[in-house]
Image: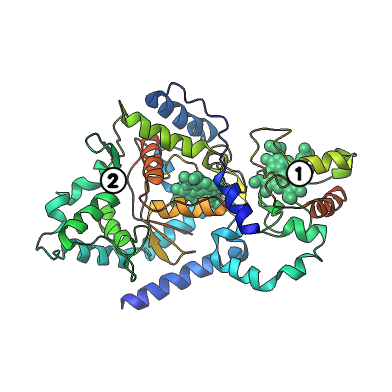
Amino acid sequence: MRKLFRTLVMSASVSVLALTAVFSSAYAADDKKADAAKAEAKPAEAKKEMTGKDLAFDRGLGNCLACHMIAGGELPGNIGPPLIGMAARFPDKEKLKAQIYDARVANPNTIMIPFGPMGILNDEQLDKVVEFISGL
Amino acid sequence: MKKVLTAAVAMSLSFAAINAVHADPAEDLTAFQDHFKTAFKDIPFEDFKDGAYALDANLKAQWEEMESSFPPYEPDIDAGKTIWETPFKNGKTYADCMGDIKSIRTKYPYYDAEKDTIVTAEGALNACKTEGDGEGFVDKEGKPLLNKGKIAQLMAYIAMENRGEKINVATPEGKAVDWYEKGKNFYYAKRGQLNMSCADCHTNNAGKMIRADLLSPAVGHVTHWPTYRSADGEITTLHNRFMGCNTMVRAANFKAQSDEYKALEYFLTYMSNGLEWNGPGSRK
């Protein structure tokens, strides 16, 4: 009886979650299963071929969608401003790169991850992300 | 190589925006709660016990529906009751060292001056079991298991018996202030490879969406433990959530009932003074 009860509970909550299942946590690390799935789906080799968009959307790398609305990305967060009209807002790509490399320079208390200094995105990856973002 | 780098980054903490030179816990408490009262003007203070659900009527309705028809922690409460009532190897029971079950939730966490430490409910239960059984809460390999499993089930029963009491941690004084400070610093320190503090998410951005998750306000963080999370499929303690959030920002983790997390619990519980204890809880 208890087992049945628990099964019912599980399926009830799973169906409530179904809509958001893929994005049930902000960071992959909060969801061990997602982490494991990711590790299988993306061996180190494949990472080399990632586009700027792939890098920006990947939960383990840019994960920009955690905080920014970006065209083409689903269920974005709203902690940071929507990334639209970027060429107009950042005509100088070096400035855009600087912002993504280390947001603390512009705002020492920012929640935005210092992608460069923390070693999350390397220089080549940063350039690809900058290209993608400035085209938005 | 990458692992080493990550670990090194995880170890380095930068303390930003902490002006803790002359801590006045009572003043902090007012400022802390006022921040949320101002940021969420339409939300009655007592509702903060419901975490992120207090901020979103739709989510709250779904959650209340689940809590009232299939409270997912119910089997754990029953298991916890059995644990509470089963005598230890030495013949004594939890009641012998913990006292009246109805008095437990409001008593912890508190500062024990003699031992110069913070005593949490889980810590006291583990000490009680260790005395009676010759062994605390452990997993199959005999390692301490203090963030889930039997201790969480026992806490689920105790929390249920204590629902409706108000959080009322005594204002830290004397050497207790050092523990309070330790917890406060933990809360405001940037940490991990992602360089985020608890406050970044749960004070400065509470109510915002991080990806598809609505960030809960820190006031109310301690009210409803242990909690059955659908994502985990089991009931876990408050320190388990601390561990989860630390992992999320890729920070060095601490053990359940470590001094770090006891201090954090002490700080956060004091910051929630006046709210209702409403554990056990359920969250997505």
Quote the CA–CA distance across marks 2 and 1: 49 Å
> In which image quadrant can residue B158 be found?
bottom left
Name the one closer to the observer, B217 or B43.
B217
Q: Residue furthest top?
A: B22
Name which residue type carries label 2: Gly
Q: Residue furthest left?
A: B91
- Badge 1: chain ID: A
Q: Which residue is mark 1?
A: A101
Please tell me whether mark 1 sits on a helix, a strand or a loop.
helix
User: What is the crowding at mark 2: few (fewer than 14 residues within 10 Å), some, or many (at least 20)?
Assistant: few
Q: Is residue B262 above or below residue B136?
A: above
User: What is the crowding at mark 1: few (fewer than 14 residues within 10 Å), some, or many (at least 20)?
Assistant: many
Q: Quadrant of the N terminus of chain B?
A: bottom right
Residue A84 lies left or right of residue B24; in this view the side is right
Q: Which residue is mark 2?
A: B164
- Badge 2: chain ID: B
Name the one closer to the observer, A13 or A57.
A57
Residue at 30 percent across and 35 percent down: it is B169
Residue B164 lies left or right of residue B195; in this view the side is left
Residue at 34 percent across and 70 percent down: it is B141
Q: Is residue B26 above or below residue B209?
A: above
Could one spot residue B222 in this view of the protein? Answer: no
Q: Nearer the viewer, mark 2 or mark 1?
A: 1
Residue B273 place in picture, x, y as percent: 35, 35
Residue at 56 percent across and 69 percent down: it is A33
Name which residue type carries label 1: Tyr
Name the one closer to the observer, B121 or B168.
B121
> In which image quadrant can residue A91 be found?
top right
Q: Is residue B275 above or below residue B78?
A: above
Residue A124 place in picture, x, y as percent: 82, 54
